[in-house]
Amino acid sequence: MVLGGGNYWRAPLVRLAGISGRLARDISVKMKIVRLLEILLLLPFASGLLNGSGSTKVYVSNSLGDDITVIDLDTQKVTADIKVGRRVHGVCAPADGRTLFTTVESEKNLKVIDTATNQVVATIPLTGRPNQCASTPDGHYVAVPIRDANSVDIVDLEQKKVVKVLPVAIPHNSYDADNNQQIFVSSMGDHEIDLIDLASMSFVKKIPVGGIPRPYAVSKDGKTLYSSLTDLHGFVIASIPEGKITARVELPPAPPAACPLEPRTPTHGIALSPDERELWVTSLADSGVYVYDVAGKKLSSEIPTGRCPNWITFSPDGRFVAVSNSDSDDCSIIDTRTRREVARLKVGKGPKRLLALHIP
């Protein structure tokens, strides 16, 4: 996690690191120095999070409506509704929580929302119908899969426009693993997850997942990928450096999925806890969530949710998980320590993507 929200200070850090890099003559040393400087600059923000200043909000996109429901996670109440346009799809944000990005299928654009006011402050045209976006932590770039053009748009938020379009066969989800230099996009057509280098604006790695990739998660060190697949009640684990699947994990048997928004997708939500010790996974057919112990390689018993649990997000402090329930039009709030649902709140119609943010 690094600072963001339009404060594009990374280039000076790279130049400063370059001084030490010339002494070390090692690009890896240079990038470690950049990372250290980022952490030092992040300390005031982290201090505010630890001291409890600000609030934590969950933003739920209602895919069959035109709005985003806002939930105050501290009070566990719905506090606002943001109108953004019909068939809202993705939500993503930089690390500082000051802005939220959302993709709107009907308008083929990316909208920027001020989280302090819940107002749309900018609209950026895209090249086609968008899916789930991903933002770099510093808020400089947003990647947006374009379903009807078999491509992914790279949006530069400084310039407020698409600066690169890369080909992807049936793209679905973008993902950022806390990295300002790289971003992922899934290819349902090629059964792989593609890694984009943002400096060269080109693909640098393609990771096969053994089926049609659905939602996925990536460890912050960029080495391990967890992906749900079409027709798999579970997920696969892949090594990114090796470019191959290392494990296949199946959830306990469940009845056939009957979720109209996610056909042939028994698992559609998957997320790593902030400490990366746990992977939380939805079971749409069974109306629940499972917790996978990453080190112990064990599954928990099922945690009940609403109907057709779709997408998962963690609060930044790891205390809560929020799950969108696409068939019951509500959102489950789960205490990660007790692994029990502590609230279920009505949202809009067809909730899918959701994101928890600390708002300063």
Image: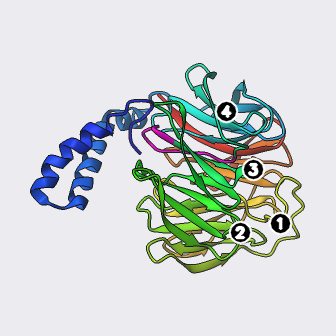
Mark closer to the chain start, 4 or 3: 4
- Helix, strand or loop at mark 3: helix
Within-10-Å neighbours for mark 1: few <14, some 14–19, many 20+: some
Q: Amino acid at mark 3?
A: Asp
Picture residue at 70% right of the left edge, 64% below the top? 188
Residue 56 shows up from this direction? no
Picture residue at 45% right of the left edge, 34% below the top? 96
Q: Find disc 2 in the rendering and name its residue.
A: 212
Residue 230 falls in which quadrant of the image? bottom right
Q: Nearer the viewer, residue 154 or 100?
A: 154
Picture residue at 58% right of the left edge, 33% below the top? 100
- Helix, strand or loop at mark 2: loop
Within-10-Å neighbours for mark 3: few <14, some 14–19, many 20+: few
Mark closer to the chain start, 3 or 1: 3
Cβ–Cβ under 8 Å for marks 3 and 1: no
Mark 1 or mark 2, whichever is nearer to me: 2
Measured along the vertical axis of the image, is residue 174 above or below residue 214?
above
